Image: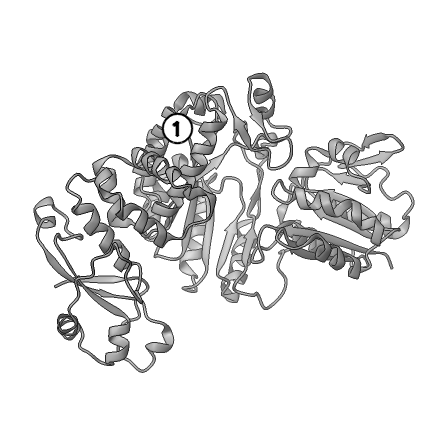
Amino acid sequence: MAKILLVAVNAAYNHTNLAVRSICEYVKQNNSSVNIDFVEFTINQKVSDILRGIYESKADLVLFCTYIWNSEIIQKILPEVKKILSDCMIGAGGPEFGFYAEGYLSQIQGLDFVIKGEGEQTVLEIAQNFTENKSDFLQNIRGIYLKKGEQIIFNGERDLICDLSTLPFAYPQIDFPDNLIYYYESSRGCPYSCSYCMSSLDKRVRFMPLDRVFTDIQRFLDANVRLVKFVDRTYNLNPERYIAIWKYIVDHHNKKTMFHFEIEAEFLSEEALEFLQTVPANVMQFEIGVQSANKKTLQSICRSTGIEKIAQNVKRIPPTIHKHLDLIAGLPHEDLDSFGKSFDFVMSLKPDAMQLGFLKVLHGTQMETFAKENGWQWMKNPVYETLSTPYLSYADMIFLKDVEVVTDAFWNSGEFCKTMTYIEEKIGFWNFFCKIVDEARKEDVFSAPRRTLFWFEFLAKRTKLFDSQDKTLKELLRFDYISSGKKGGFPAWYEHRYDKENHRLALEQNGGVINARLDFAYSDYEEFSINPVATTTEEQNIPCKILFMYPRREKDTKDLKTELIQKTKWIVL
């Protein structure tokens, strides 16, 4: 019997590929006689290792799932497959090859056909035809681009799957490894028209029935998986529906699984915002695409200009929900000054993480046409990242790349909480990050990855640039540094004002010394010339002593009557 292999090349080892799983299960559900399976690799593996995995499958038909981030390695793999499986037919689908099918078919030797659009029904027909007639199995199958001599033929568009309940659950196994990220879709399509996005090309939105969504969610909860990411292009389209899903998750939560949603904050309903106030910590996280605060920019890319409503709603999302906000560099009408204002706008919303992304000019989008007509320069090959625009030079773009690095270090790391609050009040985030980039470039800092501890020392040596007194900022840096976890030693810049007897007294006054070795190992004592946790200026100027209590490993709490804390606690003495 002919064997069909679906190949996914993921971005990381802990990712799962929803597409190959959904297609594989759909084919099995509708034709149990077809011999089909899938295999997953990562972009970090050697081409030779991936080829070996494909060879050992002994497949007669191999189908690759493609995206902009795995296209480069798949283009290296494809021409080699027929050298090791000479009679094998090779196809590819997914958003990268599917929207540039003619280009890839003409460029890549050994690629026989490309699938455009949703893959389940198309692959089912391919599998059935291939099993019956290997020589002419692609004829009359819609959604297929294929080579015919020197020509490339398209068999016509395939209708979308209207009833998503016909799609099987993509993860039928009983035991889920809990270290993987599981992707799930409760809807397909997007009604919005963002000019840079593939999803804007088809606005027909279809929903999975709610009872089916609840059943699928329960399977994840029962399996105690760590993270489920909803891949709905915009999750919060229908309030009655999306709030019902949130309520089901909260009502049935297992105190372990995190659910990730991509939302449009501007369109959260009042009922949704009120419900979110009841959501406990470690249940949900939101990714919110702001993209720009420049209304002319937003209008030019066909996005809503309601940034005031975005700000209002984001501020109402409670701190129990992790908020990830996005900006895109390289959009129309946005120079460095405008981008800086967008940056400060997003940072004023206090995201838990701020992602500075760079415009990708994707095949088939409105942005591609606009960019060609208006002087954009971008990479010819995936990931099609913008190199320059009429508003940002290449030098500006690489400056923003460095801003991205220091934003990750000082903000997204979560290690500089008190320091960054002070910086915002003192000079503002954008000014700070620009100055840090300028200083870092003097020492060629960006030539190699740097750990968080490096950035503590880097800023400690430059506090006078941001604090003329050179006192408050240094004390806040000390507080953030010692808050980040128990230290085996302290660097030269850090003045550790420690007293062991005061440390013991502080422990005795706050729960007692139960096990001296562990109690000292999971705590520290420090004295400050200001009060770094004060809520008023008057209080901040008062010197204080602080006991730091660090999270314990579970094995060190079994025989102790002590609270298992999740993050560092501090007690002003």
- The residue at the far top in this view is 373
Secondary structure state at the residue bearing disc 1: helix
Would you place residue 352 above or below residue 565 in this image?
Answer: above
The picture places residue 511, in percent across and down from the top left corner, at 18, 74
Tell me the quadrant of the picture where the N terminus can be found.
Answer: bottom right
Residue at 77% over, 31% down: 156
Horizontal side of 461 relative to 187 (left or right) equals left
> Does the rendering let one see residue 427?
yes
Where does label 1 land, which residue? 339
Tell me the quadrant of the picture where the C terminus can be found.
Answer: bottom left
Quarter assignment of residue 421: top left
Would you place residue 128 above or below residue 340 in this image?
Answer: below
Count of numbered marks:
1
Which amino acid, mark 1?
Answer: Phe
Would you place residue 187 above or below residue 195 in this image?
Answer: below
The picture places residue 202, in percent across and down from the top left corner, at 61, 32
The picture places residue 430, in percent across and down from the top left corner, at 32, 34
Horizontal side of 53 relative to 530 (left or right) equals right
The picture places residue 58, in percent across and down from the top left corner, at 82, 59
Horizontal side of 268 relative to 21 (left or right) equals left
> Does the rendering let one see residue 268?
no
Q: Residues within 10 Å of mark 1 (few under 14, many from 20)?
A: many
Toward the viewer: 306 or 559? 559
Toward the viewer: 33 or 546? 546
